[in-house]
């Protein structure tokens, strides 16, 4: 009897030991797999530990061009928290682009390396692409991505802001200024400057984009002619209008496929979201390079309607970009002054209202001969040319140089006060990137991490108290009692 009891105990003990060994083997195996094939999951609501689409686009470009990237992070060894934070960020880049190499260097211990890289202060991250390098002192995603973007650029592009007509100033830090927009443009490695066309014979040859932001008085005929000549050479123009202002400029834009009206948009949806009736919220975007995969709401304070003309020719293609909600409408200046914001079918239009549009223009003298012949032969019975099927963002052939034009019905959408409101800044910068023919930079840009407060209701607080304090300990107690009773019963048998 004792023999059988000792044999049974041996088998039970052996089974338990085998179970422990198998369990440990599984844990070791999983750990080995995790080390060999690391995988990250970002469970934060804001995607704090996931690279933004813009960062991924640039890394995809590096992969296609097979460009090696090296990052030297000069941090003191004792600065453990900052080093771990930067290492985690660089790991995110390396997960997407394995050819990105990085290393941490203590500038006090490795003075030769620090001197060779001309490190005068730290922390500093030196990012190298080929023989070019960029230095950043704040290592966040926005800084790293912009640094890589600047290193990939082979030319410096120039953005001019028109002045002399009461436009929003890129030098102003006031709420109505464009200082924030200017700084974001420069982060993309563009150079910015202001220009007075009344003092120059033509738009400068080095102009990549000409921005006209909220002129309060109209442009002179000579200035409009300079801009017309600039567009004939394939220039890029970004116009941000104000309601009831600059009628001559609006007439000029009509020649390039834009329809504007002397109105202002009223939107009930904005009031629901805590805004003002005259600050429409835009969540509907027409599919285009600027707005592709753009799913962030934007706000257009004091905006007039801007739509693409339905009358198009072989040298002009346009489309709407941003639409207000169906519960919006337009009113005229008299209604605005009288305080009567009700919809009037005789003077206004029902939503959705287009408040931003785009067009591409190919001057007839630069059209490809085949295109000219097509425009002469492919006509409707009434003598009008066939409407082109091409998309406005279609790449021009080698023999043509297309002008790119974007018009917004609000200049305040890019002002210091509203630039960082929801998707306003991204929409503005996507427009700049498209006008500069830098489509690879069009995406939702990296955001600086922000604290996300957790607001708990009373029942949520109660659950948080009960689960760790009551439920989990009680579960262990019940499990212990079950095991104890099972063993007691087994021993009795």
Image: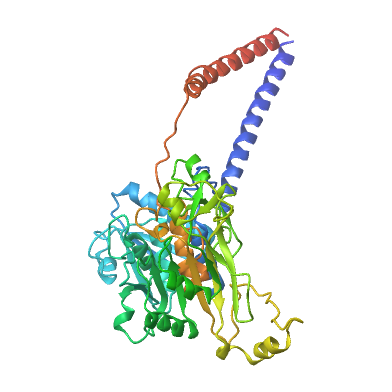
In which quadrant is the C terminus drawn? top right
Where is 446 relative to 224, above or below? above
Which of 365/127 is in front? Answer: 365
Q: Residue 347 in the image: x percent, y percent?
A: 54, 56
Which of 59/427 is in front? Answer: 427
Viewer can see residue 432: yes
Where is 196 relative to 286, above or below? below
| Left or right side of 378 for 216 | left
Residue at 44 percent of width and 54 percent of height? 334
Residue at 57 percent of width and 53 percent of height? 36
In which quadrant is the N terminus drawn? top right
Q: How is the image coloured?
A: rainbow
From this viewpoint, which residue is outermost toward the right? 381
Q: Residue 49 in the image: x percent, y percent?
A: 48, 49
From this viewpoint, which residue is outermost toward the top? 492
* Residue 287 falls in image quadrant: bottom right
Q: Residue 152 in the image: x percent, y percent?
A: 44, 73
Where is 237 relative to 478, above or below? below
| Left or right side of 370 for 58 | left
Which of 97/424 is in front? Answer: 424
Residue at 36 percent of width and 83 percent of height? 204
* Residue 29 falls in image quadrant: top right
Viewer can see residue 421: no
Where is 367 relative to 64, above or below? below
Q: Residue 149 in the image: x percent, y percent?
A: 43, 69
Which of 194/396 is in front? Answer: 194
Q: How many marks?
A: 0
């Amino acid at each position: 009897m004792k023999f059988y009891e000792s044999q049974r105990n041996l088998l039970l003990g052996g089974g338990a030991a085998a179970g422990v060994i198998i369990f440990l083997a599984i844990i070791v195996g999983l750990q080995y797999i995790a080390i060999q094939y690391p995988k990250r999951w970002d469970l934060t609501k804001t995607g704090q530990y996931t690279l933004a689409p813009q960062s991924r686009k640039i890394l995809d470009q590096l992969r296609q061009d097979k460009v090696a990237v090296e990052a030297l992070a000069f941090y003191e060894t004792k600065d453990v928290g900052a080093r771990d934070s930067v290492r985690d960020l660089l790991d995110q880049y390396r997960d997407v682009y394995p050819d990105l190499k990085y290393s941490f260097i203590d500038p006090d211990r490795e003075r030769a390396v620090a001197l060779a890289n001309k490190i005068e202060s730290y922390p500093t991250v030196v990012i190298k692409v080929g023989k070019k390098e960029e230095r950043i002192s704040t290592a966040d995603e926005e800084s790293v991505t912009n640094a890589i973007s600047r290193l990939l650029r082979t030319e410096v592009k120039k953005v001019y802001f028109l002045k002399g007509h009461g436009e929003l100033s890129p030098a102003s830090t006031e709420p109505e200024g464009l200082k924030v927009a200017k700084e974001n443009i420069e982060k993309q490695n563009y150079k910015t400057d202001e220009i007075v066309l009344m003092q120059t014979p033509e738009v400068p040859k080095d102009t990549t984009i000409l921005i006209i932001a909220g002129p309060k008085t109209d442009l002179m005929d000579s200035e409009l002619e300079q801009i017309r000549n600039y567009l004939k050479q394939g220039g890029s123009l970004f116009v941000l209008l104000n309601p009831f202002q600059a009628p001559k400029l609006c007439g000029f834009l009509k020649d390039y496929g834009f329809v504007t009206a002397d109105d202002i948009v009223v939107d009930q949806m904005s009031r629901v979201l805590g805004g003002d009736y005259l600050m429409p919220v835009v969540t509907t975007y027409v599919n285009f390079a600027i707005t592709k995969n753009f799913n962030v709401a934007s706000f257009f304070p004091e905006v007039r309607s801007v739509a693409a003309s339905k009358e198009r020719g072989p040298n002009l293609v346009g489309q709407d970009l941003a639409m207000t909600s169906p519960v919006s409408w337009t009113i005229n200046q008299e209604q605005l002054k009288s305080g009567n914001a009700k919809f009037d079918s005789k003077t206004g239009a029902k939503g959705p209202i287009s408040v931003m549009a785009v067009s591409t223009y190919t001057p007839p003298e630069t059209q490809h001969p085949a295109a000219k012949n097509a425009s002469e032969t492919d006509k409707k019975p009434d003598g009008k040319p066939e409407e082109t099927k091409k998309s406005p963002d279609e790449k021009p052939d080698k023999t043509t140089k297309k002008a790119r034009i974007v018009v917004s019905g609000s200049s305040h959408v890019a002002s210091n006060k509203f630039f960082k409101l929801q998707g306003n800044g991204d929409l503005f910068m996507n427009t700049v990137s498209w006008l500069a023919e830098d489509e690879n930079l069009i995406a939702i840009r990296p955001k600086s991490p922000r604290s996300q407060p957790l607001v708990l209701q009373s029942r949520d607080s109660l659950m948080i108290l009960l689960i760790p304090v009551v439920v989990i300990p009680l579960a262990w107690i019940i499990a212990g009692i079950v095991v104890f009773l099972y063993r007691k019963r087994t021993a009795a048998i």
